[in-house]
Amino acid sequence: MKLFVDIWGWLTLHYKNESKHQETVNLYRRFTSQNQRIYTTDYVLDETFTLFFKRLHPALASQSMKLLIEVFKAEKFNLVWITEERFFKAQELRIKFVDKPLISFTDLTSMVVMKEFGIECVLTGDAHFIQVCMGFQKIPQ
């Protein structure tokens, strides 16, 4: 099984005051201990790093950012870059889901990547991944 980690997932893993922190840590550890593939995108990391520095003490934000960069040097972690083709596919989704204006463009690019790599499971608190009816499963539920 493959896992896509959304911005919410990375923040909740690194921010102990989040209500679902321990549950999220346990889910993440379960995936990594079973050598499951973990995916995220450069767009997700962009927003995650920005939010680290908005929400965390600067020293903790720096440490969290460095740790996350190190994580993606491991073999089971995949950092997927949003190419021009993926960007245009996300634009198509934006038009398709015009009735869902609260879905961020970053989430749409994540959905494109999840479909491309056959990823059904997403570590997120964001219901948008379910609302689009593309076969995604949100954890925790």
Image: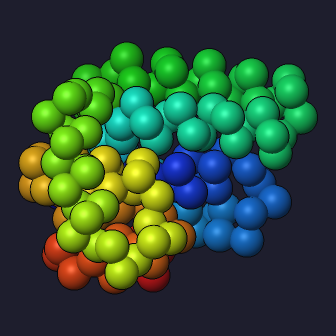
Whether residue 29 can be seen here: yes
Q: Residue at x 26, y 57 (%)?
A: 111
Q: Nearer the viewer, residue 65 or 116?
A: 116
Residue 32 appears in which quarter of the rendering?
Answer: top left
Residue at 89%, 34% in the rendered image: 57
What residue appears at the point 17 percent right and 75 percent down from the top-left corner? 135
Residue 49 sits in quarter: top right
Image height check: is 53 above or below 3?
above
In this rendering, does residue 26 appear at all? no
* Residue 44 locus on image (x, y percent): 46, 41
Question: Which residue extends farthest right?
Answer: 57
Front residue of this view, candidates 81 and 36: 81
Q: Which quarter of the figure has residue 82?
A: top left
Figure quadrant of the C terminus? bottom left
Residue 99 position, x and y percent, is 36, 81
Taking the spot 53% from the left edge, 32% from the top edge, the residue there is 46
Q: Is residue 63 above or below residue 54?
A: above
Instruction: Check the image and report above or below for 54 versus 70.
Output: below
What colouring style does the render use? rainbow
Left or right: residue 135 compared with residue 44: left
> Residue 140: x, y in percent?
47, 74
Whether residue 118 is situated above or below residue 45 in the rendered picture: below
Q: What is the count of numbered marks?
A: 0
Q: Would you say 122 lies left or right of 23 here?
A: left
Q: Dividing the image into 4 quarters, which one contains the N terminus?
A: bottom left
Horizontally, residue 110 falls left or right of residue 140, namely: left
